[in-house]
Amino acid sequence: MKHPDYACYIVVLMLLLLSGFPARAELDAVSGWPDPLTPSALTEIRSDGLPDDVAISLANGFPLWYQDSSGVKLELCLEQEVERMGGGLFRPCLTEEPILSQPISFPINFGSEASYWSVTGVTTFSSTFGAGDALLVMSQQAAFLNEIPHENEQAVFSRIRLRINVPVPGDYQVSHPFGSRTYTVATVLAERDISQTQDVGGTFSLDFLTTLADATPPPSPLAPLVPSIDEAIVNQDGRSIGPFLEGNPSVRVLDASGNQYLADTGSDLAPLEIPLEPGPGGAVFSITLLTPPDTDFRLDAGGVDGVVDNTVTISRFQVMGKIFNDGPNLMPLAVDDFAATSPGVPVVIDVAINDIDPPAYDPNDAYNPLNPANTNVHGLHPQGLGIVDGESILRTDTFTTTRGATVRRIIDLSTGRSRFLYTPLDDVSALGEDRFEYVIQDKGGLVSAPATVTVQVEEVAVDQAEYRPRIGRWQIGGSTNDTTDNSITLRVGPRALLAGENLVVPVASEATGTVALRMGEAGIEYQVRIDPLPLTPVQSIQLYAGAPESSGQAFFSLFNAAFEGGFPGEAEGLLTSSDLLTAPDAEISSFADAVDKILAGEAYVSVASSAYPDGEIGGQLVSPLIGIAPVQDDGTWIFKGKSTASPGTLRSVDAFSTNGNRVLGQPLLLR
């Protein structure tokens, strides 16, 4: 075997460098899908790889991480305010979501750009004659071709941007951590005397490899450049960003879960700035006037960097980036789900609620693969759902089932969690069982095997609902199209008995009362009676989410003294979606969520008074059982007989099939 001629290689390399051939990019790789032989580990895709091999987040369609030549892997920095390890809150990422009070989610609450890495240096300075300012931005950006968050328009690019206003004409050498370039300013403008933006990659959507390269080198000779916005030349050799610069890697900022961030960014208006470890071109951003107008002129007359001379130097920067945890990972498990609805009636299916990927890690040492406590360092991604469509996985696109129903992923804006919205056709062809498959992804990028969601589309009808008070006998009947192991459970409308002893913290109050509801999919009728009233004025009557003997968030108000004056002892009305108070901690973000919570027995009433602002009397909402009627072979069902349940003041019946389909608020006839 012959040995390679290394001397020849060196000569060729020197010739390439002298001819302006771009230096090797120091962004080394992007996340790749696991190899079949190692299904629990992502691979590394280089610039000469295949775009389809890049592993992306099912939540937003961007690569899971980018890696530099030193082995640092950064994921998209999308965290808002988080808890610092050891206490206190901090902001690790500068984000651009349109709804600032809600979690980031794609596409509705996702900014036009996001960052894997960003370093910003900015200053103003005063010269012997006039003032100036300077801005340097170095970043790895996630964006969209049309600058609007939209599926299949994702793009990633590396950026070096210079924005400099100078006080006098002349030749200026601009240096930064990735190189330098000299510019000739012939005439001082009102703004942006030197304005250059070098973006590498991002030209084509879904091609996440081009950003790993360097820029095209500038033409020779390397004479001073007259600044122009469209030149995009920031280095003499065309170098792009890389490696990812930060402060001291040994003092990264940790949140309460052990996640590592390059720095605390502070905020847009009050940035926290730190010195950088040197890049290929050093650790500072500087502007040097090579041709001062006279010997007494000083570009930095105010001494921004502590020295009065013709060089303005910035040595502290705002730094942003989140380390991807490359620790041990296990594939998540998606579990089959079942849902039910009626023709034409959409149903939201929370498939992730029973999926499995329990994190197991030491939060103080979550990035150490040798720590035996770290066996699964990620956990499920709250938005990482996809619908299986043949060989493809749909993230936000709509899927049509064999029965003509549509399925699409939706985001609960208040919690940031993904669910599926299934909408059947509004005719008899929708009746019966329907199916679709989905996968779920964990925060480490691993995707589960497909699971099946079975949807029973059923038409439940209540044709008769009667009660004979004299003999206490019920007669309720109807029909359904599903006759397989099916039955109908009948309940009266939810009601609550109010007393001080029913509260989580009991109150010795003489006041008592009742609340009755008549349920509906789009509205809830309510009736409140309190007698005797509390000794001090009633301030509010609210429905809270919570199981018996618990405390939770309010999601409906039945009375509020601030708007309605004094409580007369009785109140009635209709609750609709406009009355809903979202309760993210209780996963109530829609009227349907509120109805489900009440019917599940996970809601209670609390009456607050002046003396007891946290509640003087209250009670759990319950729906007493009337009885259960088996479905006959012809689809009919009927319940006849007595029951311990009473009709109540708002007389109605709720019917539930074994599948979970329901008829709510059926009026009850007294005979």
Image (cartoon, rainbow, N blue to C red):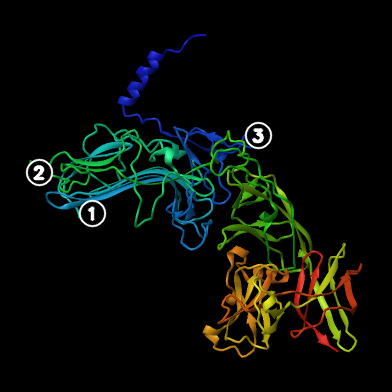
Examine the image and state in which quarter residue 267 appears.
Answer: bottom left
State the CA–CA distance, disc 1 to disc 3: 55 Å
Q: Classify 394 as above or below 612.
A: above
The amino acid on which the numbered mark 3 sits, given as a three-letter code, is: Pro
Total numbered labels: 3
Disc 3 packing (10 Å; few <14; some 14–19; many ≥20): few
Q: Which residue is mark 3?
A: 36
Q: Nearer the viewer, residue 513 or 281?
A: 513
Dot 2 falls on a residue whose secondary structure is loop
Residue at (10% x, 43% y) in the render:
293
The residue furthest bottom is 568
Q: Secondary structure at mark 3?
A: loop
Q: Which residue is mark 2?
A: 293
The first of marks 3 and 2 along the sequence is 3
**Label 2: how many residues lie within 10 Å, few (<14), some (14-19) or many (20+)?**
few
* In this rendering, position of residue 646 left or right of residue 165: right
Nearer the N terminus, badge 1 or badge 3? 3
Of residues 465 and 564, the one drawn nearer to the viewer in this rendering: 564
Q: Quadrant of the C terminus?
A: bottom right
Q: Which mark is residue 548?
A: none
Left or right placement of residue 465 versus residue 421 in this view: right
Say which quarter of the image contains residue 516.
bottom right
The amino acid on which the numbered mark 1 sits, given as a three-letter code, is Glu
Callout 1 touching callout 2 (CB < 8 Å): no
Question: Rounded to the nearest whole Å, what is the CA distance between mark 1 and mark 2?
Answer: 20 Å
Labelled disc at residue 191: 1
Marks 3 and 2 sit apart, C-alpha to C-alpha, by 67 Å
Give coordinates of residue 519: x percent, y percent.
71, 77
